[in-house]
Image (cartoon, helix red, strand yellow):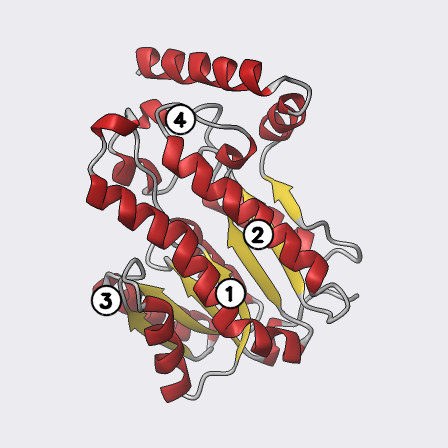
Amino acid sequence: MSPVDYRRGVALITGASSGLGEEFARRLAARGADLALVARRADRLDTLAGRLRAARGVAVSTIPLGLAAPDAAAALRAETDRLGLDVHTLVNNAGFATHGLFEESDPDRIRSEVALNVATLVALSRAYIPDLVRHGDGALVNVASTAAYQPVPSMAVYSATKAFVLSFTEALWHETRASGLRVLALSPGATRTEFFDVVGSENARVGRFQTAQQVVDLALTTLDRRNAPPSVISGTGNRVSAALSRLLSRRLLVTTTGRVMAAAEARG
């Protein structure tokens, strides 16, 4: 396989108004991709779109849409069809985390977290994968997390949703490997984005911060590899931690993770 030629169609990016989604938009536009940017904040999407059109000369469509709604994937597919967009690459980046004891969590917030992180990601993957496979030379990137590699007390729902994303995406990698489509689960750790603003505290952070540029660079470099793996973890320390987690019993793993989270919260 040669490096991905993103000029061959539209790159659809969710959660594109900030953080990793915005960085994916910038980097793919720099590689000649036309873009469809999806997020709730229309003003930020329009500002980003204007800058990318001016800087890169690419076509950019903006689709303001809240993706946690039950019919969000169908609504997005209908809108891209209406706009005549031929989706070649899909980056499922939209998602958020909750932090705190599960028994004290807002039930509506939990439902939205599972809907966005899992249900919509699966529905969008299903809605567009026939087009991605037909092209056979684009990419499907699902953003997971280092939280996918172990249960995380005080972020129980988030870590479980990301474990789902990791498993689901690796299975899709195998199912589509003969098509030429590049499928990748991207697992960042703590990243300098608005993620912790939504969580409500940086006390949930474990490990050193990376930049969005570092994380997206790893994703694009991995996708360009001849024999790209089904998943990748951003950050050497994060990769070591994930490898060590496989050596522990489940009891010891969750106990250790709980202690690490408690220490991070105390430090904060």
x and y percentages locating residue 20 in the rendered image: 44, 50
SS type, badge 1: helix
Which numbered disc flags the more N-terminal residue, 4 or 1?
Answer: 1
Q: CA distance from mark 2 to mark 3?
A: 30 Å
Residue 13 left/right relative to 4 = left
Q: How many marks?
A: 4
SS type, badge 3: helix
Please report the residue visible at 37 percent of the width from the left and 74 percent of the height from the top: 74
Q: Identity of the amino acid at label 4?
A: Arg
Q: Identity of the amino acid at label 2?
A: Phe
The residue at which mark 1 appears reads as 125
Q: In terms of depth relative to the viewer, which is nearer, 12 or 163? A: 163
Which numbered disc flags the more N-terminal residue, 3 or 4?
Answer: 3
Please report the residue visible at 46 percent of the width from the left and 69 percent of the height from the top: 12
The residue at which mark 3 appears reads as 42
Q: Identity of the amino acid at label 3?
A: Ala
Labels 2 and 3 touching (C-beta < 8 A): no
The residue at which mark 2 appears reads as 168
The residue at which mark 4 appears reads as 205
Count residues near mark 3 (Cα–Cα under 10 Å), then give few for <14, some for 14-19, many for 20+: some
